[in-house]
Amino acid sequence: MDVKVARDLAEGMKIMHLEKQCHNMLRQPVSLIVLVAIVGALLGCSSTNRGKPAQAPESRVALKGAGSTLVSLLFKHWFLTYQNKYPGVTITYASVGSGEGIRRFIGKNLKEEEMVDFGASDAALNNEQIASVSTGVVLLPVAAGGVVLAYNLPDFEGDLRLSRKAYTGICLGEVRYWNDPLIAQTNPGKKLPKLEIITVVRQDGSGTTFAFTKHLDAISEKWHLRYGPLTRVSWPGTALRAPGNEGVAGRIKESIGSIGYTAYAFAKEGGLKMALLENKEREFVKPTEQSCAAAFASAEIPEDLRLFIPDPAGRDSYPIVTLTWALLYSKYEDSKKAAAVRDLFRWCLLDGQKYTSETGYLELPQNIAARTLTALKTITP
């Protein structure tokens, strides 16, 4: 018999028994005060059993996180689904960017409202940052995605193809107009306007910026010597700055002649046009879940789980991809929070993976997911 049905039947029998007792008592010469007391006790007992929540109030746990905007669409879907399934846990996540998420996770000089139980970053943590966290750190790859160059050219028909020289030139401020020969030569027969290129970039410390500039650092000597991989860049030329991936995607959508880097998930959600980029094998590849997944196909994850693929090999590989890491503490003072964090991210790594494609992300490769689950077990109260 179904457990719920059995429980409802038991409650029904209790109520019938209670009604019979009340009826019998009313026939006896019992004082009104005693009668009220007995009935009140019986009703209280029945009400307590009938209204008991699935999880007792003392077992409820509230988790707070902050960080990456690149993964925020997936996190939103994950956390809402998880809370509906396990109402004893409430999760709030502030999509404030990887840089701010790291700052809050490290936890120096924070206001009370900034304190978190976990962070998220597309740049992981460096050795110095890890050493600064006294409780220890577990870096947990939980999601994978692509970084695209989305653009706004209303009269341009077909797919825009950008060579490595063209898009690094745009980022360096050397390719300034849409009809530049470097763009025209990979788009033969296409009408390109004599229109100034407006780059749209992040104004906040960003893991998306880190993934994008790590790629530029790998393919361009000029970029390597001038900037390197960074979470925040002093961009040359005419640049519009916006907070978060959502902000960048919004600016591109409203600015004719613009091009900017943002997470594939946000460009897809916003209906933005995305450039085909030249990869390591000199193929022009369209950003899709499949081409981004191809970039991870032969990746070997290192012991510390900090896997970066700044210039993936393979004819079908999209050239700019990244992991997102959940930043967790090795040791939590509150044993209930430790258990809740472990259970939440275990669900994300197992059941939660089926929601990745529909939100514009990639299912974690099996070898990465297996290593991540092992790392999750090291978290202790």
Image (cartoon, rainbow, N blue to C red):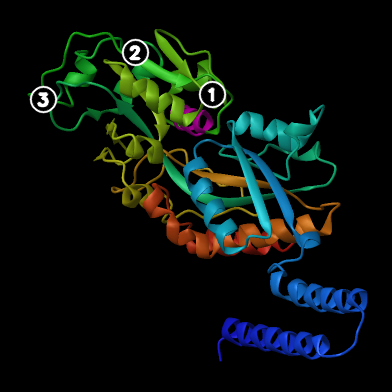
Q: Give the x, y percent position of residue 308.
A: 53, 43
Task: Give whichever of discs 1 and 2 has the lower sequence position.
Answer: 2
Amino acid on which disc 3 is placed: Pro
Amino acid marked by disc 2: Ile
Magenta stretch encompasses residue 300: no
Which numbered circle lies on residue 198? Answer: 2
Q: Whole-Å distance between the Cαs marked 3 and 1? A: 32 Å
Quarter that holds the N terminus? bottom right
Q: Is residue 295 above or below residue 224?
A: below
- Please give left or right for residue 106 compared with residue 74 in the image: right
Q: Which residue is mark 1?
A: 228
Q: Which quadrant: the C terminus?
A: bottom right
Q: Which residues are magenta?
A: 208-217
In the image: residue 83, left or right of residue 189: right
Q: Which image quarter: residue 231?
A: top right
- Residue at the spot 15% in from the left edge and 26% down from the top edge: 187
Figure check: 372 above or below 195: below
